[in-house]
Amino acid sequence: IAYICNMKTKKTSIAIDMDGVIADTESHFITWYHKDYGIQINREDLIGKPESEAFPDKQAVWKFVNSPGFFRTLPVMPGAIETVKELMNDFEVYIVSAAMEFPQSLFEKHQWLQEHFPFISWKNIVLCGDKSIIDTDYMIDDHFKNLDFCKGKAILFHAAHNATTDRHQRVHSWEEVKVLLKKELEAESSY
């Protein structure tokens, strides 16, 4: 007697960070700094510096991330919406963001995702404190502190603060993410 199992194949999973990956925090910091201090900072001025040390007033970044509206009004990274939608055809996509350190961010990040990424189920949104608990096949993040402990394949999303160090495979745009992950998927299916 043969037993037939109808097994659902599991999709390859991706954890995608918010700040600096699908949300453009760099341009937002620059805009808020100019608005509050009247000084225009260029992205080139931020290269190789941690966000908290990148601006003349070293308290500015902490002031902004603790201000109501900062996380709610972040611009979307170019190409992020279209690429994430496309990736969802072949991958199980999770949005994973540290949201516990700054009190305003938890609610505002949830609202931001509902507005810009409404196609992502609440079941695939992980707002946490420590990303080392995440166990996905891939993780796309702009911070080494998250990628260094990633259980899957780490993909570094380019940002000014990480521009001078190479420890993980780097992508500079959402177009590069799409190309890389399609190649990975093709390589996976050829086994």
Image: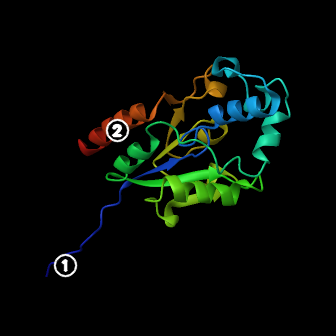
From what the image shows, is residue 166 above or below residue 184?
Answer: above
Q: Which residue is mark 1?
A: 3
Count numbered badges in the picture.
Answer: 2
What separation in Å lies between label 1 and label 2 (alpha carbons)?
A: 34 Å
Percent x, y of residue 85:
38, 50
- Identity of the residue drawn at 32% across and 39% down: 182
Q: Which residue is mark 2?
A: 184
From this viewpoint, is residue 135 visible? no
Left or right: where 151 falls relative to 137: right
Is residue 120 or residue 111 the one in the foreground? 111
Left or right: where 109 falls relative to 187: right
Percent x, y of residue 97:
62, 51
- Identity of the residue drawn at 77% across and 41% down: 64
Q: Quadrant of the C terminus?
A: top left
Percent x, y of residue 12:
38, 52
Indicate the secondary structure of the residue bearing disc 1: loop
For label 1, count other residues whose C-alpha is less than 10 Å away and answer few (under 14), some (14-19) or many (20+).
few
Which kind of residue does numbered mark 2 sit on? Answer: Glu
Which kind of residue does numbered mark 1 sit on? Answer: Tyr
Q: Which-is-in-front pick, marks 1 and 2?
A: 2
**Among the 4 quarters of the image, the one containing residue 9:** bottom left
Q: Quadrant of the N terminus?
A: bottom left
Indicate the secondary structure of the residue bearing disc 2: helix
- Identity of the residue drawn at 68% across and 52% down: 130
From what the image shows, is residue 10 above or below residue 76?
Answer: below
Disc sitting over residue 78 in the figure: none
